Amino acid sequence: MSRCILAIDQGTTGTTALVIDESLAILGRHTEEFAQIYPQPGWVEHDPEAIMASVSTAVAEAIIAADIDPTNIAGVGITNQRETTVVWDRATGKAIHNAIVWQCRRTAGACGLLKERGHELKFRARTGLVLDPYFSGTKIAWILDHAYGARERAEAGELAFGTIDSFLVWRLTDGEVHVTDATNASRTLLMNLKTGDWDPELAGILDVPLSVLPEIRGCSEIYGTTKGFPGLPDGIPVAGMAGDQQAALFGQACYAVGEAKCTYGTGAFLLMNVGEHPIQSTNGLLTTVAWRIGDTTTYALEGSAFIAGAAVQWLRDGLGIIEKAADVEPLAASVADSDGVYFVPALTGLGAPYWRPGARGVIHGITRGTTKAHLARATLEGIAFQNYDVLRAMEADLKKPLATLKVDGGAAANDLLMQFQADLLGVDLVRPALLETTALGAAFLAGLAVGVWPDLNTVRQTWKQDAQFAREMAHEDVEQKIQGWHAAVTRA
């Protein structure tokens, strides 16, 4: 039989494991959810042992579903929820505190204090990030300051930090390997984008001892081999790692400068390949590592809209105008347009390029003739308008037009939304045959390291398209709609 890759996609609410062969056939798949922990408002935690249990179950069930001998697995690829922070005991492998999740806002005060002390520009210039509790650095310091004796133990070399990728590799190799990859490292506020290594000065400012940090490695190489992990034989190479959004960019085969992807999930996450030199955004975007393969690092600009699919969930759960999310497309398609209604889905503030946390949702242009169908259409259009703003900001930073937009995630199956997005941007939207591009990216990275795919050209040829959308709306109509959108945004 052909060689296959085990891709582990460790997400915020659950873990998905896929067994994929070299033709991209999914031989087995399983998703295992785990509980979210909310100690107090604004705080989000995970039990690291619950995460590991979900990984073990997902892996075992995916292999059973694939009906393969697990010794035929050529390599393991990992992708993960980024920024979520774990600190564990090097001797036992057990976490000393629950994982602090990327969504957690408990270190907002610490970030505010760092800004007051004038550190914002330094962090922005060196890491490409903003000082925000979203990222891992302040989370590490919080754990060391609040778990009993942790700071002293860290200084003594007894503790290890990692994002979920790092924790997973530690467990998969029975504690023999403490590494992270460049994409996850670039989300910590601790990695210098230009040197590609930890920045001692920034670590000092954040009060994070260098002794807890993992070694930064590339995204496609053999880090170690499996040992003592439930459901897997010993000796399988662990060979690919990338944070979830970077893995999706790689899984979409966006290997040329100017190629971008948008993942339509609860929010919308957009990344654009900007090549081998990091670009400092002047338009409200983040700069991040896209991937590192061998001696070459590729960078990306990143922007996100906090609300995308969640706006459709609000129509369903908050307003009750649809029974299930899939109903939004036929309802929206029942009218020719939104009849001048604009929905700015700033239900939790506005993200890039506006960064207005105090913004709130606005429905603008309602008349006596407005129906729930118009509101449904305005909701889908609002998702697309937000992405338009982010992608135009990316073009301004890159000083180069968007080449193509690859789309994935659950809402990418909505043809009406995809067509409107293509109309706004005036470039082709391409939807892949396999929408699980996050796991696919992890599989590609691992497969390249172990020779399942010999090079990037082979990977690109292996990638399969499902549908393509091109602009159909007249240019003057597009411009009028964009003007109306920006007028509505000012009211949010």
Image (cartoon, helix red, strand yellow):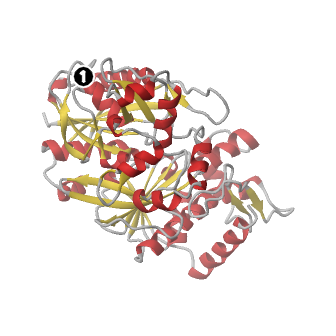
Residue 293 locus on image (x, y percent): 22, 53
Residue at image x 72%, y 56%?
375
Quarter of the image with the N terminus is top left
Number of other residues with Cα within 10 Å of mark 1, as a class: few under 14, some 14 to 19, many 20 or more: some
- Relative depth, front residue between 215 and 38: 215
Residue at image x 46%, y 36%?
140
**Is any atom of residue 233 visible in this view?**
yes
Residue 331 locus on image (x, y percent): 67, 52
Q: Secondary structure at mark 1?
A: loop
Q: Is residue 147 left or right of residue 439?
A: right
The answer to which image quadrant residue 193 occupies is bottom left
Q: Is residue 414 left or right of residue 22?
A: right
- Relative depth, front residue between 277 and 486: 277
- List the residue tagged with mark 1: 174
Quarter of the image with the C terminus is bottom right
Residue at image x 16%, y 54%?
455
Residue 299 locus on image (x, y percent): 34, 60
Residue lying at the far bottom of the rendered structure: 476
